[in-house]
Amino acid sequence: MKWTLLLLALALSAKAQSPAAKAPAKDEASASKSVDPKLHADAIKLVEVSGAKQRIQDNFASLLDEAQKMMMDRCPRCTPEFGKEWRRRFQERTNIDDHLDVYARVYEKYFTDAEINELIGLQKQAPAGASLSPALTEKLTSIMPSVLADSVGECSKLGAKLGGEIAGEIEREHPEYLKPSPDEAKH
């Protein structure tokens, strides 16, 4: 069962221009600081053995195409030069490790260390016919929508934050990359 492939494929389909990220609530921030170091290390190991980094790298260009198109669709004043500059900066400043960290934090939130180690074992044994315990199979079935939603949502927030920062920079640095607004065009 390649559940991580499904998880990562859906997470990678997250668009870079979704609602902007807000600061984590005080409870979320303190909860993330109290994570068991072994659980955290094993969650990172699960991300590594799942091949997530390579899949992100393999799909990044097409995801960037989608994000640029979406940004341009939402910005009727943006010229093609704006879009090219936005894409260049977004590509340059995207840190894939930030997305991998999202996956690790989501795994920490939903799985115990023993469950993560079982998933690591499955990744290492596949495709040799390894299978999950019935309890973990049942748990995956029930929580997968939440795992996917958290992964996609958090990765989208990362992209939205970076995309918004870049758009603001370009607007300030290159006002010539924007078409006049309808009000400006009348004058």
Image (tube, rainbow, N blue to C red):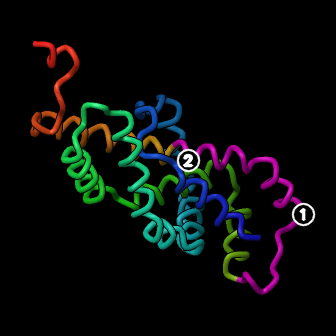
SS assignment for the magenta stretch, majority:
helix
| Neighbours of disc 1 within 10 Å: few (<14), some (14-19), many (20+) | few
| Stretch in magenta | 125-153
The quadrant of the picture occupied by the C terminus is top left
Which residue: 52% across, 35% down? Answer: 28
Residue 170 image point, x, y percent: 17, 40
24 with respect to 86 (left or right): right
Element type at mark 2: helix
Residue 102 position, x and y percent, is 50, 52
Whether residue 15 is in magenta: the answer is no
Please name the amino acid that badge 2 sits on. Answer: Val
**x and y percentages locating residue 56 in the rendered image:** 47, 65
Q: Quadrant of the N terminus?
A: bottom right
Q: Which amino acid does label 1 sit on?
A: Pro
Report the residue at 69% width, 54% height from top: 111
- Residue at which label 2 appears: 152
